[in-house]
Image (spheres, helix red, strand yellow):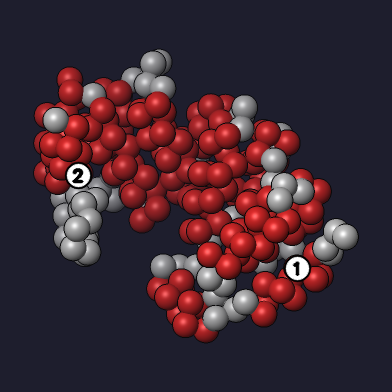
Amino acid sequence: MTETVAELLAELAALEDPEVRVVNEKHGDDHGVNLGRLRAVAKRLKTQQELSVELWATGDTAARLLALLICRPKAFGRDDLDAMLREARWPKVIDWLVGYVVKKSPHAESVRQAWFEDPDPVVAGAGWALTAERVVRQPEGLDLAGLLDIIEAGMKDAPERLQWAMNTCLAQIGIEHPEHRARAVDIGERLEVLKDYPTPPNCTSPFAPVWITEMVRRQG
């Protein structure tokens, strides 16, 4: 029997954990559902594109996260993806939308190019996240030196999400492309973006010079 949106919203509400919400709110999110339990619900539902669209339309953050887990990424048109990103204002929803749906879409490159220079920093951040992915997986055709020019000029004063995505792109260029490594490290050292970011033990700092150096060491 197919479960209704109302039934699923009630189930998600029952999974709400105040302690999880407190932690998530510190990261800018607005839900309190343990993501392991959310994934268990998605595993039970399997892929259901129509239900996914209905869950997304509720606007509820937990429902939207569930929607992204049960959708068929290739079923969304380019305009659908653009509209969804502009509606998705919470970090975890944006991350999952880009990581689980847009990256698997045949429209990924089209929206990457459109979002990359969007005046909305959240949208631009998604464009940069997709660009960082291309730097690693399909760099052919990218102007890496030109990307470094843009990062050098704009990353220092960029809003948080956009800055983070640009920094990721900077690090990936330095890690994956030895011919640009020295410049990428130099830009990171001069801009000092995320230099003092609190990093747990046994984790790599997101500060680009440290990140690049550590990843290259592991490759060696």
| Image point (41%, 22%), residue name | 138
Residue 20 to residue 113: above or below = below
- Snapshot quadrant of residue 5: bottom right
- Snapshot quadrant of residue 177: top left
Residue 1: x %, y % from top left: 88, 60
Task: State the quadrant of the C terminus.
Answer: top left
Residue 171 vs residue 28: left or right? Answer: left
Residue 75 to residue 59: above or below = above
| Image point (45%, 36%), residue name | 130
Q: Which of marks 2 and 1 is nearer the N terminus?
A: 1
Residue 42: x %, y % from top left: 66, 57
Secondary structure at numbered mark 2: helix
Q: Name the residue under label 1.
A: 8
The mark found on residue 141 in the picture is none
Amino acid type at image mark 1:
Leu
| Image point (73%, 56%), residue name | 45
Q: Name the residue under label 2.
A: 211
Amino acid type at image mark 2:
Trp
Residue 209: x %, y % from top left: 14, 42
